[in-house]
């Protein structure tokens, strides 16, 4: 059973090899709230999302999971503006500063910057 509002399986980066490829070949664009790592998709025409929130960000699993939820919510708020790239989102700001609308606004800017880097 699929939850409503979640990301479909094919819309997520799930394998370690996919994350490694994006980190190795991708371009980075950083803002105050998040860091975006974007790479050309492994499956052309369909971009996928990965969220990376390590223990270094916060030792509390509850706060790390909240950060992941906020980042995924901001991604869903993009709607049809989602890029056709594989993207990893990494939070930079403390979890209490992350709000989906603010992250979404920064995400639009950072994705545009990453797309320019990928084209050049």
Image: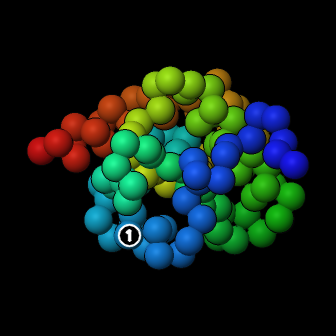
Q: Which residue is at 34% across, 49% downward? A: 44
> What residue does disc 1 label?
21
**x then y, percent, for residue 50:** 56, 56
**x then y, percent, for residue 69:** 75, 45
Asked if 97 appears above or below 68 in the picture, the reply is: above
SS of the residue under disc 1: helix
Q: Nearer the viewer, residue 11 or 60?
A: 11
Tell me where residue 51 sits by quadrant: bottom right
Q: Which residue is at 22% across, 47% downward? A: 118
Q: Residue furthest front?
A: 1
Q: Which residue is at 21% across, 44% downward? A: 117
Report the side of 64 relative to 74 (left or right): right
Asked if 99 appears above or below 114 in the picture, the reply is: above
Q: Nearer the viewer, residue 64 or 75?
A: 75
- Quadrant for the C terminus in the image: top left
**x then y, percent, for residue 83:** 41, 36
Tell me where residue 71 sits by quadrant: top right
Callout 1: 10 Å neighbours few (<14), some, many (20+)? some
- Asked whether residue 39 is in view, the answer is yes
Q: Which residue is at 55% across, 59% downward? A: 13
Report the side of 67 relative to 120 (left or right): right
**x then y, percent, for residue 11:** 57, 48
Report the side of 49 relative to 59 (left or right): left
């Amino acid at each position: 059973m699929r939850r409503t509002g979640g990301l479909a399986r094919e819309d997520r980066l799930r394998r370690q090899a996919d994350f490694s490829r994006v980190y190795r070949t991708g371009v980075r664009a950083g803002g105050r709230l998040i860091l975006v790592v974007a790479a050309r998709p492994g499956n052309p025409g369909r971009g996928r999302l990965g969220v990376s929130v390590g223990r270094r960000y916060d030792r509390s699993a509850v706060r790390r999971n909240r950060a992941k939820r906020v980042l995924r919510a901001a991604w869903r708020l993009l709607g049809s503006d989602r890029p056709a790239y594989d993207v990893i989102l990494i939070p930079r700001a403390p979890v209490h500063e992350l709000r989906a609308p603010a992250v979404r606004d920064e995400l639009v800017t950072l994705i545009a910057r990453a797309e320019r880097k990928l084209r050049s």
